[in-house]
């Protein structure tokens, strides 16, 4: 019986090649989209779940209020981990982690390594990063010990055994290699190439609540203790002894929040070692995958019910021969299953072929091998069954429930219900398509707004070079040597990159009767920073060499005095006007004079409003050089910088990047989302048009005689095309009208995540609607014109 079912299904597929091709292609595209989206979602969802103790690990984040302003950071001070383990029995272990680029030398090999991680000796007890050489209990239990990854072992040592050998770190300290670990998986928040003992750092010798440089992780006895520990921790930080030790007074507070490790990547608003994902985008992509597959199922349902008009003979014979309704239902459901599983196989192969392109779109390294594990294969099979039922149930129901007497009397025609359903499904297809078009346009507009937003500083043609401690001794000479090239317009140094300022500090202002403490972001910089970055001074004047002379460190800093530049937001928060601030004294550990007020600039992403910021003179913290180039002969200018670097900084390799790359990195998630939206919007539109094309072709065949008669009676080409097109175009217009409010609401909610955003313009909706109508018109017109140009004699000859 089953053999006959599939034999009939195969014959029917060969008989109606266009119908079969469109359905298989549509289902294959839908299944391919779902597979690719599922791989992406699985990668995002699986972050950090590979750790054996994943459900017991929590990240500690810092929150404090100073003068009514609340700040939150993913980093904590050195005291947090040790103190929590001493205080709370539920904390089994802690690991402080601090990532810092290091120049590493082994014999003649010298590299600047960015993934150099310092951590406590309990690191391998908490996380499941596997050591393939060395003892995890002792690998990091002393200063200047180092564990390296397999990749780094090959890079530096080739076929030699690295264990026991030494690497020169930052041209000052020898670290002994005590172990080799497997490379961290892609779906890990913590990535590293080198893991050094935390006791190698000077910071490890003291415990401090406030010096927030470390990302701290805790291992709990069991996962269920986290809510209770959070309550205990909050109460502990409110105790008088802790507040006194942390120098917290009045209504200010300092506390710590616990985040389950497996939720940090998708649910936390605080980035750690890398930008987090976003659970909202995961839900959106999952919905898009389902909607695209729904469109493919709609195509099948529409074409199958439309084609039922031509199967009256088959159904009549089968009913006369005794076929019952269940048998007919299973027969037609079997046809759906055959088409679906052919499409499933094509979709699987296509997904493998498209994976490199998809990896480029998503900035991931997904592999096809995960699709052939038992669970994914079972999921694919289940998806095939679900799609078979969803796509084939209604056509099977319609065909199997037809009355024999009605078929023999008047044939199997379109029922009113069938026509209504087909129209509704076409409307739903284009609602989805227009919604995605509008969403894509608005996302691209917001990204364009981000790219062209006036930031308050110049990020174009700024080359960023690293600065280390060894360079501080001849810092001025390096700057002068770089500046000698006529294509270099300015050179400045600072501790913080202006695209993302994370140095948090506090200032004290004595306003006579009023004392004001203000939390503020800070940039330690040199004399030329404001000028080189093109920041606008609205009151006062720039730093000068005289300001450097005020920083007198003799006599135990007795005469030391800072010079400050504040932004507009800082002056406003204090309660001054820009011109009133000049010459005023404020304190940041030591007193200083306000030298200038600059125009507000964006020193974090556009998700955040601009807050108070201070630039102060201090070159001892300089970690980056910003070189402003003219844009003429960029390659030659870079070569010049490399030559100077080799002469003046021989101890480290020449590396550079552009400042606008740092800015673009802030919006990595949004850029990836826009690419995915564009890709899958195009896919949805293609599917909708594919179904519309096939349905138009089938409708045209059914109305061949009518078209022939109309042409004989004098109907023009325009009349015939309009006759076949108008009904479909009406449906697309209705779909556009329904999609407009849905898209506006969704995009309005998405834009609320940005403090600085575009306005949603009416023309976006009109453009998307017109685009949908135009695409549908072209799709329908291809078949309509073909039918209109046919010879009416040929159409009527067989009547």
Image (tube, rainbow, N blue to C red):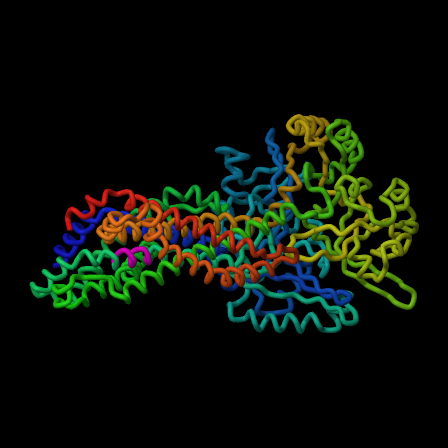
| Prevailing secondary structure class for the magenta stretch in the rendered image | helix
Q: Residue at x 70, y 51 (%)?
A: 602
Question: Where, by quadrant of the figure, is residue 656 drawn?
Answer: top right
Q: Quadrant of the N terminus?
A: bottom left
Q: Nearer the viewer, residue 605 or 267?
A: 605
In the rendered image, the residue lying farthest to the front is 714
Q: Residue at x 29, y 56 (%)?
A: 300
Residue 370 seen in this snapshot: yes
Relative to residue 701, is residue 515 depicted above or below?
Answer: below
Q: Is residue 636 left or right of residue 43?
A: right
Q: Is residue 403 left or right of residue 295?
A: left
Give the magenta-colored segment's residue range.
297-304
Relative to residue 626, is residue 240 depicted above or below?
Answer: below
Q: Is residue 303 magenta?
A: yes
Q: Nearer the viewer, residue 85 or 721?
A: 721
Q: Residue 330, percent across and down?
A: 19, 62
Q: Nearer the viewer, residue 526 or 170?
A: 526
Q: Is residue 345 magenta?
A: no
Q: Residue 202, percent across and down?
A: 71, 50
């Amino acid at each position: 019986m089953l053999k006959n079912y599939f034999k009939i299904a195969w014959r029917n597929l060969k008989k109606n090649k266009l119908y079969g091709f469109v359905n298989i292609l549509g289902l294959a595209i839908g299944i391919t989209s779902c597979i690719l989206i599922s791989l992406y979602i699985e990668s995002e969802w699986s972050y950090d779940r590979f750790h054996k103790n994943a459900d017991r690990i929590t990240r500690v984040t810092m929150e404090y209020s100073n003068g009514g302003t609340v700040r939150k950071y993913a980093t904590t001070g050195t005291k947090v981990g040790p103190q929590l383990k001493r205080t709370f029995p539920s904390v089994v272990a802690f690991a402080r982690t601090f990532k810092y680029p290091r120049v590493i030398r082994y014999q003649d090999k010298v590299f600047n390594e960015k993934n150099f991680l310092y951590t406590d000796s309990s690191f391998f007890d908490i996380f499941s990063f596997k050591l393939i050489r060395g003892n995890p209990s002792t690998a990091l239990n002393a200063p200047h010990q180092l564990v390296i990854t397999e990749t780094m072992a090959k890079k530096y040592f080739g076929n030699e055994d690295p264990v026991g050998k030494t690497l020169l770190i930052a041209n000052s300290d020898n670290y002994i290699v005590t172990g080799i670990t497997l490379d961290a998986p892609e779906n890990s928040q913590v990535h590293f190439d080198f893991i050094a003992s935390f006791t190698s750092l000077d910071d490890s010798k003291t415990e401090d609540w406030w010096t927030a440089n470390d990302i701290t992780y805790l291992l709990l006895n069991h996962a269920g203790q986290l809510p209770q520990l959070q309550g205990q921790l909050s109460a502990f930080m409110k105790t008088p002894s802790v507040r006194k030790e942390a120098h917290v007074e009045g209504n200010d507070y300092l506390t710590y929040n616990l985040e389950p490790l497996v939720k940090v990547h998708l649910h936390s608003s605080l980035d750690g070692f890398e930008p987090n994902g976003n659970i909202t985008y995961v839900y959106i992509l999952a919905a898009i995958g389902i909607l695209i597959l729904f469109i493919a199922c709609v195509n099948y349902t529409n074409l199958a019910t439309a084609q039922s008009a031509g199967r009256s003979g088959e159904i009549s014979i089968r009913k006369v021969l005794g076929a019952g309704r269940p048998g007919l239902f299973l027969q037609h459901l079997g046809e759906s299953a055959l088409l679906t599983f052919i499409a499933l196989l094509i979709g699987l192969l296509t997904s493998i072929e498209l994976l490199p392109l998809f990896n480029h779109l998503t900035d991931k390294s997904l592999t096809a091998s995960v699709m052939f594990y038992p669970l994914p294969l079972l999921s694919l099979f289940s998806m095939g069954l679900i799609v078979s039922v969803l796509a084939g149930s209604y056509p099977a129901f319609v065909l199997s429930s037809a009355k024999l007497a009605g078929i023999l009397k008047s044939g199997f025609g379109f029922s009113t219900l069938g026509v209504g359903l087909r129209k509704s499904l076409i409307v739903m297809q284009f609602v989805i398509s227009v919604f995605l078009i509008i969403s894509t346009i608005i996302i691209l507009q917001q990204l364009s707004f981000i790219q062209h937003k006036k930031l308050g500083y110049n990020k174009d043609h700024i080359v960023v070079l690293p600065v280390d401690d060894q360079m501080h001794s001849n810092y001025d000479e390096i700057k002068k040597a770089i500046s000698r090239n006529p294509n270099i317009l300015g050179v400045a140094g600072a501790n913080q990159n202006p695209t993302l300022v994370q140095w948090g500090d506090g200032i004290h202002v004595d306003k006579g009767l009023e004392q004001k403490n203000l939390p503020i972001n800070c940039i330690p910089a040199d004399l030329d920073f404001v000028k080189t970055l093109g920041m606008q001074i609205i009151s006062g004047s720039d730093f000068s060499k005289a300001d450097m002379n005020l920083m007198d460190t003799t006599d135990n800093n007795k005469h030391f005095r800072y010079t400050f530049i504040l932004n507009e937001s800082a002056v406003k928060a204090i309660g001054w006007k820009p011109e009133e601030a000049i010459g005023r004294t404020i304190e940041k550990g030591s007193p200083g004079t306000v030298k200038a007020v600059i125009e507000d600039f964006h020193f974090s992403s556009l998700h955040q409003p601009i807050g108070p910021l201070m630039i102060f003179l201090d070159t001892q913290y300089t970690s980056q050089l910003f070189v402003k180039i003219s844009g003429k002969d960029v390659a030659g200018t870079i070569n010049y910088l490399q030559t100077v670097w080799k002469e003046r900084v021989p101890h480290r390799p020449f590396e550079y990047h552009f400042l606008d790359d740092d800015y673009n990195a802030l919006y990595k998630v949004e850029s990836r989302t826009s690419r995915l939206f564009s890709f899958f919007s195009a896919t949805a539109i293609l599917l909708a048009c594919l179904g519309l094309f096939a349905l138009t072709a089938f409708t045209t065949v059914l109305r061949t005689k009518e078209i022939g008669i109309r042409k004989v009676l004098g109907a023009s080409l325009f009349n015939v095309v309009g006759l076949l097109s108008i009904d479909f175009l009406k449906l697309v217009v209705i779909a556009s009208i329904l999609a407009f409010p849905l898209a506006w609401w969704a995009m309005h909610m998405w834009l609320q995540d940005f403090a600085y955003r575009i306005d949603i313009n009416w023309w976006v909706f009109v453009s998307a609607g017109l685009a949908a109508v135009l695409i549908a018109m072209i799709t329908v017109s291809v078949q309509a014109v073909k039918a209109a140009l046919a010879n009416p004699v040929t159409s009527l000859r067989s009547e």
